[in-house]
Amino acid sequence: MSSIVNRQVSHALSWLLMVTMFGMAACALPGCSLGVMFGKMFFGDPKIKCQFRSATGVDLTKGEDSILIACSAPHSILSRFPGIPIDLVDRMSRHLKTRNVKIISADDVATWFDDHGEWGDFSELAEKFKADYVMHFEMESFSCDVPDSANLQQGKVQGKITMLDTTKPSEPTVAFERAFSVSYPDYPVPKENKSEQLFRESFLDKISVSLAQILYDHRASETVN
């Protein structure tokens, strides 16, 4: 009997060692894609609590609180990509609506900005649209080119996200702030693989989903940044 028990223990230890070694090897690979698969195999695909809910305790997917999204960029970006801020807000808004997040119309916000010419401190804007929260993405850099290479492309964006609680428009408070950056893809790719226009479209999709995921809980496998 003891020999049978010993064999069972030996098999269990061997299996545990094999699983551990596989997990360590998988996580050592670029992007840890096998590591994600390994984790899902044994632990499922858990939901990640989004930064907004972690900071405020508010679940926007209940559709009870409205959020207004604004994006700004310096002239150096707008001179080359004039429609980027509006495009990003539109993509984010459409994505968030599929998650039942109550979004102030991006078109209405863009019209307000055109009439006023600047965002200000967002108090007037929040009061106008009765927004409970404002998400401001202040873009600092945006590019799709690879320095010193005319045949490669890689998207990179950096900026700062500020989430404002505007339930009291006269005195909006900062719910949280964080730096934001995305590279797409992880390594430069030849331009011959995809036109510059299609590449930029894919890059904007990645940015918009990455920004949107700050506002709703999502599965680990859905994380794009």
Image (cartoon, grey):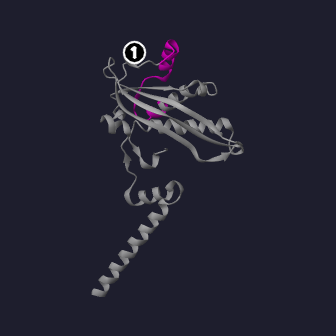
Q: Main secondary structure of the magenta part?
A: helix
Up the image or down, 177 lies above or below 166; here it is below
The image quarter in which residue 56 lies: top left
Residue 197, magenta (yes or no): no
- Which span of residues is magenta-colored? 93-118
Direction from residue 54 to residue 111 in the image, left or right: right
The image quarter in which residue 66 lies: top left
Quadrant location, the N terminus: bottom left
Q: Residue 40: horizontal and vertical position, in percent?
A: 42, 56
Q: Is residue 195 visible?
A: yes
- Mark 1 burial class by Cα count in 10 Å: few <14, some 14-19, many 20+: few
Q: Residue beneath label 1, please?
A: 124
Q: Residue 37: horizontal and vertical position, in percent?
A: 46, 57
Up the image or down, 186 lies above or below 102; here it is below
* Nearest to the observer: residue 34 or residue 97: 34
Please identify the residue farthest to the left as the structure is shown: 1
Tell me which residue sits at (33%, 33%) in the image.
Answer: 62
Q: Is residue 1 visible?
A: no
The image quarter in which residue 86 lies: top right
Direction from residue 81 to residue 125 in the image, left or right: left
Tell me the SS state at disc 1: helix
Residue 109, magenta (yes or no): yes
Q: Amino acid at mark 1?
A: Glu
